[in-house]
Amino acid sequence: MAAVSLSAPPRPVYLLLGDDPFRIRLRLAELVAALAGGGSTESAGLVRWPSPDLGAPLGVTRHDARNDSPESMVMSGASQGLFAAVDERCVVIVEHAEALGSDSLLGDFPPDAALVLVTTEKLAASRAKRGAARAKKQQTPSVDLQGAVTRAGGRVERITRLAASDVPGWIAGRAHLRGVQLAPAAAGALAEAVGADSDRIEQELAKLGAFAVGRMVEAADVRVLVAGAIESDVFALTEAVVKHDPKTAIARLNELLTEGQAAQQILALLVWQFRVLLFASAMRNTDDANRMAKAIHASSPASLFRWRARARLVDRKLVTRAYESLYATDLAIKQGRLSGTTPADSDAMALTLCVLDLCGIAGADVRELTVGEPPHK
């Protein structure tokens, strides 16, 4: 949420900062509309604001602190637009405000014009990157923007990344704003797939809305259209396997197969997730997570931390045994070791046997299928 005061600042100077770029842009659009239109600058709730697009208001000027000088920003605040009304307030937006070399802009800026500084807080970097950042920081003096804005009588607003508990409500609010009808299961699948990435939530909702064309979006639609959704479902399948819960594991597998997911795709994701489990069992700290995430092409270290607690309960011998079973299943599918009504049925039978084997069910050793010569077709 945006942390703001309950009253307008003595001077119309604002600093927007945080670690959620999309929601910062939403707040910027909301704030600029209020400043240009003379409305209240208090946020009515970012989930209700339609778009980060600023439009083309006549009295608004944008600057990039990486390229533009503070003098040009002061000049923009003092200049009256050609078509501006006499009582219209100038609004100057300074993006990448962290690049400002000093806080002199705040002292020189016209008091009757509105100044909005925008910057994004960086997340913690790895040890090597932190060392490079420290070396660069020693060369470039930093400006205490928060202190400078506060001393100038302005207001500091921090827009933080969505908490996990806030993601479902954010998805529901943005979907309602776009007129997208999400089934509860679809909303849950979307939340699992994209997490707290508000920018990606916006993109995926636009895609789902265009696909559904007014009808209800179901969980199956999310799994087909949203990258990472099927990985979340296979994660639940893998978790059930690790817990030796065959009932839940087979139920999840049947759901995936019923929705049209190919057995080979599910098998590939199972292999990948057991690889994640193997790496997570050796992970000791954040640096390990960053390094291992790159090694296995994980989308982020979060996928490793997600498995870390479970990995502690798993013997590495079990992971090795799982690899053998998964490899045998791959061979059984490719060699047609099982005979079903259709090739898809045969693949599903092999994968079901594999899942039962991974759950520790006696007599379901899929490796026995690969003993001897493959059947002649």
Image: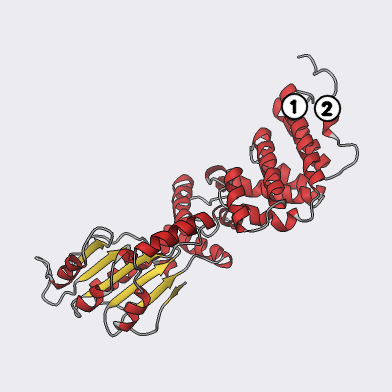
- Which sits in the foreground, 228 or 77? 77
Q: Which mark is residue 369?
A: 2
Q: Which residue is mark 1?
A: 331
x, y (%) of residue 26? 37, 64
Q: Secondary structure at mark 2?
A: helix
- Which residue sits at x=24%, y=58%? 67
- Which residue sits at x=51%, y=65%? 162
- Determine whether label 1 and label 2 are within 8 Å by CB: yes
Is any atom of residue 274 visible in this view? yes
Q: Residue furthest left?
A: 82
Above or below, comparing residue 102 to residue 8 in the picture: above
The amino acid beneath tag 1 is: Leu
Q: Residue furthest top?
A: 376
Above or below, comparing residue 66 to residue 73 in the picture: above
Marked residue nearer the N-terminal end (1 or 2)? 1
- Which residue sits at x=78%, y=30%? 328
x, y (%) of residue 62? 24, 62
Above or below, comparing residue 124 to residue 8 in the picture: above
User: For residue 158, which quarter of the picture?
Assistant: bottom left
